Amino acid sequence: MERAASFSRRHKDKDWYEGFTALFNMVTDIDFSMSASTWTTIAGALAYVVFPVDIIPDFIPFVGWLDDVFIVNWAVSIITVECLFTGSFV
């Protein structure tokens, strides 16, 4: 969890930071209730973004972050749709 928090602090100026921190807070808040599929979606997206091994390597300027931005936005949209259709995250 410290790795994700450190990652979040280093990337505060990025456009997708707000989505990333919202996902991070949802997973780490023990009082926030969500389904197993929602938790898995969020945890998978966060892991993909935080760990350096992904489809487009992060060391490539600009292009390296495109897949990370896509994953965060995808996870947020999946969770938003789930909430709209079920009325909750559970």
Image (cartoon, grey):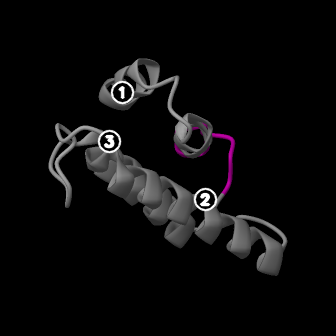
- Magenta includes 37? no
Residue at the bottom extreme? Answer: 85
* Magenta-drawn stretch, dominant element (helix, strand or loop): loop
Residue carrying label 1: 7
Comparing 49 with 83, the one in front is: 49
Q: Amino acid at mark 2?
A: Val
Q: At 43% across and 26% down in the image, what residue appears?
A: 11
Q: Is residue 13 above or below residue 40?
A: above
In the rendered image, which quarter is residue 35 located in?
bottom right
Residue carrying label 3: 62
Residue 53 image offset from top left, x and y in percent: 15, 49
Residue range highlighted in magenta: 26-33
Q: Amino acid at mark 3?
A: Phe
Label 1, label 2: how far apart the Cα atoms are: 18 Å
Mark drawn on residue 76: 2
Residue 50 visible in the current orientation: yes
Residue 50 lies left or right of residue 88; in this view the side is left
Question: In terms of sequence position, does the residue under pointer 3 or pointer 2 come before the other?
Answer: 3
- Magenta includes 32? yes
Q: At 60% across and 70% down in the image, what residue appears?
A: 78
- Assess disc 3: are there few (<14), some (14-19) or many (≥20) residues with their C-alpha within 10 Å of its C-alpha: few
Mark drawn on residue 65: none
Question: In terms of sequence position, does the residue under pointer 1 or pointer 3 come before the other?
Answer: 1
Residue 78 lies left or right of residue 6; in this view the side is right
- Assess disc 1: are there few (<14), some (14-19) or many (≥20) residues with their C-alpha within 10 Å of its C-alpha: some
Q: Is residue 61 above or below residue 41?
A: above
Q: Dot 1: what SS?
A: helix
